[in-house]
Amino acid sequence: MCLCRESAPLWTLLLLLSNLLLWDNVASVTMCAMKNGHCFLSLKKMFHMAGKQSREASEIISGIFTDFKKHYVEVHRLQKTVPNKCHTSSIPLPKNKEQAWKAGKNDLLKSVDILLTSWNTPLQHLEDLFTLKDVPAVVISKVKTMKEKDAGLVEGIKTLYNLLGNGETVNYPAWTGKASLKSDNEDARILAFYDMISCLNSDFKKIKIYLNILKWKIYRLKNY
């Protein structure tokens, strides 16, 4: 039985995990983050918190996308309704909830890790949109909050993937959108950020769905 404590930072506790266990053995063991001989977080709790963070991040990104589109694309009357192809489009992922439910736990966790890692470089340039003219304060605030959420989620998922994944090497898709964000043409830059945020919004919705399904797959295990 776990003595679950929530006073320490979420992913700091995750980094205390020391027992490397195979995913297939999860059902037969109780896994917790240990400190001073006490159990802090169960596997169930870790996935619950990861799901909560991904849901909050997805909601923030959706708000950024709505605010950005309304303020720039619609106000500037730019004809943009469908974004260009996302840099993550080549990743073989479950296309809908039905496929995600049929996917194995390893595959879902791997999909989340690949998506998050694929956004590491683009997100380093997300705050470049602050250089656009008349950036709404609400957009600036949401972008900063979103990056904080993403940093925590990335750290946690990396810990879980290293702990439970099969250790295979993954080739992450390259992002080539930096030049477009640096364009001298303001409208071109606005559309480049629109594409970026639209893809980010879409991918984090997938992450939210995958983690939610993973959480319920873990909940069905007798021991956690």
Image: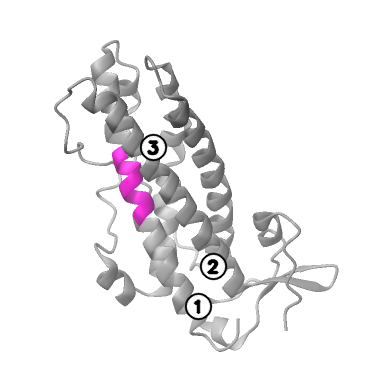
- Quarter of the image for residue 160 reads bottom right
Which mark sits nearer the N-terminus, 2 or 1?
Answer: 2
Q: Nearer the viewer, mark 2 or mark 3?
A: 3
Q: Nearer the viewer, mark 1 or mark 3?
A: 3
Which mark sits nearer the N-terminus, 1 or 3?
Answer: 3
Total marks in image: 3
The residue closer to the viewer here, 62 or 160, is 62
Crowd around label 2: few <14 · some 14–19 · many ≥20 (10 Å): many
Crowd around label 1: few <14 · some 14–19 · many ≥20 (10 Å): some
Q: Which residue is mark 1?
A: 218
- Under mark 2, the amino acid is Phe
The answer to whether any part of residue 170 appears in the image is no
Q: Which residue is mark 2?
A: 47
99 on left or right of 50: left
Circle 3 sits in a helix, a strand or a loop, which is it? helix
Marks 2/1: CA distance?
8 Å
Q: Is residue 201 magenta?
A: yes
Instruction: Give the residue drawn at x 41%, y 59%.
Output: 208
Instruction: Give the residue drawn at x 59%, y 67%.
Output: 46
Please report the bounds of the magenta region as a residue range.
198-205
Residue 35 position within the rendered picture, expressed as x and y whole percent measured from the top left? 80, 66
Residue 146 position within the rendered picture, expressed as x and y whole percent measured from the top left? 49, 41
